[in-house]
Image: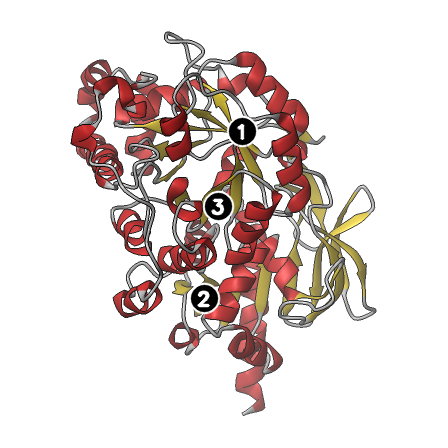
């Protein structure tokens, strides 16, 4: 008998994206550019994170027409964002047939206490994390894929680096622990105990973990791969750069060949200006999207 | 035996794990140099459009095609099967264009329609766990193609000479019987080569 929406099917979809680049797009034209550059999926949005930052106010799920337009434009998977805890936005995106939902801190949270119970859905979810506790809580709720939160829309890689190092360092620590130490570690991290047992057994997280939140250049993408990311999300970094086609292509190539430094030098030549970056220190705490969710 | 896994993008780690479980050496193939000395090649699941772009940019399409034509056994799963096919529905040109089949992409629907099921596979077993993710299927096959499994009448696993093509993902399960089937194909190819010398 066919079973849809199983853990294997939902996590497996993310496994197929490994080593790839997922790009934010706001219309069919951008989606086609992303697909032609070799993106493994696109994230359909109303605004890229840097514009959400500029616009202020409440950021919500995209107009379904934009999502539909993107779904009709490309044959690669299409993801879309729902607000943290917004059950109906998520159900609407699922009903539209999007391939993956990002329960995302880039949008204004709908619930400041509870995230979605993602195991309830047939569509798989990706969620942001800054440390292993947060990662494990999201997996506990049923996320099938993780990404670092970084600091979206800044073009500054520093927060994504902090988060991937933190998560992977904590994973290594758990893997090296004695089994009788795991319950206390679960208490300290605020992580489900069973997940720490599973991480220790596997020697890694049970789901794919991508980098996100600040990737602006091919070297940034390669850096995140070097630090152990399974792939890369690029938000504003492509369509806010001077030459989106070239940036998109170069970031895809650098992600595949992240250890080939001569190649990265070659593809980084005369790319034009990357998106304008923001020093994180100039952001108020209230302006930091990574503080959303828990 | 050295079995390569095309490692431009996709579920590479899972294929290498199964290859190693069978006592073979699993090699990540990212460039032409990695193709040297292989006794078999796995084209894994992932996004076929992405893999195709990268095969072109890193000049791997022709070298892989030429190794295949010299008899190197190849096993394509999902996106890898799309790369192997001689004809891809909706495209003018195939990718590697090796296996005498017509393939249709995403033919079971979008991700919410993806599923797992148990399949009966000829000569392998009648309880093979199969994970279908935005999977393609083989619309039609040439007369030299041996059909190994069908689902709802659609061809989902087939063999033609030294090519094995699979629409689903055996590598996402703990069951290694399909990879074992491929390793046996590689073995037979090696024996045939040695006896011909």
Label 3 CA crowd tier, 10 Å (few <14, some 14–19, many 20+) = many
For label 2, the crowd category at 10 Å Cα-Cα, with few meaning under 14, some 14 to 19 and many 20 or more, is many
Q: Secondary structure at mark 3?
A: loop
- Position of residue B180 relative to residue B38, above or below, is above
**The label number, if any, that marks residue A124 in the structure image:** 1
Q: Quadrant of residue A268?
A: bottom left
Badge 3: chain ID? A
In the displayed structure, would residue A243 be above or below residue B112? below
Q: Which mark is residue A17?
A: 3
Image spot of residue A64 (x, y percent): 63, 26
Residue B76 location, x and y as percent? 59, 60
The numbered dot on residue B74 is none
Nearer the observer: mark 3 or 2; the answer is 3
Q: Quadrant of the C terminus of chain A?
A: top left
Identify the residue shown where x is 58% and y is 57%: B49
Instruction: Estimate the spatial distance between the alpha carbons at disc 1 and disc 3, rounded to whole Å.
Output: 13 Å
Labelled disc at residue B4: 2
- Closer-to-camera residue (B65/A275): A275
Residue A85 in sight: yes
First reached walking from the N terminus: tag 1 or tag 3: 3
Q: Position of residue A239 (x, y in %)?
A: 44, 46
Q: Chain of mark 1?
A: A
A6 left or right, relative to A14: right
CA distance separating discs 2 and 1: 30 Å
Extreme-bottom residue of the structure = B197
Front of the two marks 2 and 1: 1
For the point 32% across and 31% down, which residue is it? A149
């Amino acid at each position: 008998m066919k079973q849809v929406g199983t853990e294997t099917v939902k996590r497996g979809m993310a496994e197929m994206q490994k080593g790839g680049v997922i790009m934010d797009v706001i219309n069919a034209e951008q989606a086609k550019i992303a697909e032609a550059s070799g993106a493994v999926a696109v994230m359909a949005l109303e605004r890229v994170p840097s514009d959400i930052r500029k616009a202020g106010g409440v950021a919500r799920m995209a107009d379904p027409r934009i999502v539909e337009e993107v779904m009709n434009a490309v044959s690669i998977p299409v993801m879309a964002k729902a607000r943290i805890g917004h059950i109906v936005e998520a159900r609407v995106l699922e009903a539209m047939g999007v391939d993956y939902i990002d329960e995302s801190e880039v949008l204004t949270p709908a619930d400041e206490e509870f995230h979605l119970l993602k195991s309830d859905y047939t569509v798989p979810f990706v969620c942001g994390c800054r440390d292993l506790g947060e990662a494990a809580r999201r997996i506990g709720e049923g996320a099938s894929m993780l990404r670092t939160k970084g600091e979206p829309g800044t073009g500054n890689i520093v927060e994504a680096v902090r988060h991937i190092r933190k998560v992977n360092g904590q994973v290594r620590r758990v893997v090296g622990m004695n089994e009788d130490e795991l319950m206390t570690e679960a208490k300290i991290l605020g992580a489900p105990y069973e997940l720490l047992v599973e991480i220790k057994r596997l020697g890694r997280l049970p789901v794919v973990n991508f980098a996100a939140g600040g990737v602006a250049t091919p070297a940034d993408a390669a850096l995140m791969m070097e630090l152990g990311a399974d792939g890369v999300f690029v938000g504003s970094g492509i369509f806010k750069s001077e030459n989106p086609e070239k940036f998109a292509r170069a970031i895809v190539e650098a992600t595949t060949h992240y250890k080939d430094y001569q190649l990265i030098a070659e593809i980084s030549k005369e790319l034009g200006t990357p998106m304008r970056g923001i020093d994180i220190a100039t952001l108020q705490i209230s302006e930091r999207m990574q503080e959303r969710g828990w | 035996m050295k079995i390569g896994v095309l490692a431009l993008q996709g579920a590479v780690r899972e294929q290498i794990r199964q290859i190693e479980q069978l006592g073979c050496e699993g090699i990540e193939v990212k460039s032409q140099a990695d193709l040297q000395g292989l006794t078999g090649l796995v084209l894994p699941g992932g996004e076929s459009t992405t893999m195709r772009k990268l095969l072109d940019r890193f000049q791997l399409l022709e070298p892989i095609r030429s190794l295949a034509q010299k008899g190197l056994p190849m096993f394509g799963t999902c996106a890898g099967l799309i790369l192997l096919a001689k004809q891809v529905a909706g495209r003018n040109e195939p990718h590697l264009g090796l296996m005498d089949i017509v393939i249709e992409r995403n033919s079971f629907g979008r991700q919410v329609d993806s599923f797992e099921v148990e399949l009966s596979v000829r000569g392998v077993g009648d309880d093979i766990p199969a994970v279908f993710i935005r999977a393609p299927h083989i619309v039609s096959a040439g007369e030299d193609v041996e059909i190994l499994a069908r689902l709802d009448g659609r061809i989902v696993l087939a063999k033609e000479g030294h090519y094995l093509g699979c629409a689903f993902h055996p590598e996402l399960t703990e069951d290694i019987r399909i990879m074992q089937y491929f390793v046996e194909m590689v073995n037979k190819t090696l024996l045939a080569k040695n006896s011909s010398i």
